[in-house]
Amino acid sequence: MYIKSQRVLEDEVIESLGKLNPTDVELCFTFSQTCFQYAGNRFQKDILKIMDHFQQVLSEDLHFYYTEKMRNSRYAKRLAELLKVNNTMQKSIWKSRPLLDLNRVFNVVKVGFSHPQMFEDSAFCTGFEN
């Protein structure tokens, strides 16, 4: 049960990505946007402003990709589908957090990291390893 907490909506995300068959540029946008959005929501203040700027740059690059490289100015539906995948990934992260906290409380899996803050939302983060 505890290890499974990492996979809350994983199957749905994988299935959606399989149906979309995204290009490398779209995958880069999707995962980067998810990371920037998550970091901004989690840390707020100055980090949120920086992440918003990064997302703006990503959006402009994706627009350029669709309109100039792919010659497709009607990409709103595809973009909506990509953002839906992002939202599912975000839901998965936030839904799994209570289970991850239980993992830490009961010390189900113990692995130490030199920089545990990078793995804050991982079931394997328990602190520094001496």
Image: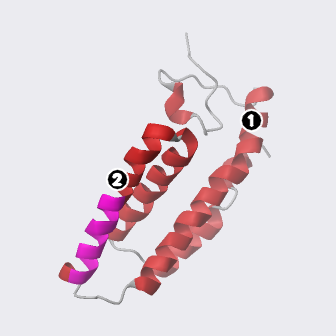
Residue drawn at 61 percent across, 39 percent down: 121
- Is 95 above or below relative to 22? above
Residue bounds of the magenta highlight: 56-67
- x and y percent of residue 95 in the render? 72, 53
- x and y percent of residue 33 in the render? 43, 58
- x and y percent of residue 66 in the render? 28, 80
**Secondary element type, mark 2:** helix
Determine the image quadrant of residue 99.
top right
**Residue placed furthest toward the top:** 130
Instruction: Quickly name the residue at label 1.
Output: 101
Give the residue type that dot 1 points to: Asp
Determine the image quadrant of residue 32.
bottom left
Task: From the viewer's side, name the closer residue of 35 and 12.
Answer: 35
Cβ atoms at labels 2 and 1 below 8 Å apart: no
Q: How many residues crowd around disc 2 within 10 Å: few (fewer than 14), some, or many (20 or more)? A: some
Q: Is residue 58 visible?
A: yes
Horizontal side of residue 98 vs 53, given as left or right: right
- Is 75 above or below relative to 54? below
Residue drawn at 54 percent across, 34 percent down: 119
**Secondary element type, mark 1:** helix
Instruction: Quickly name the residue at label 2.
Output: 54
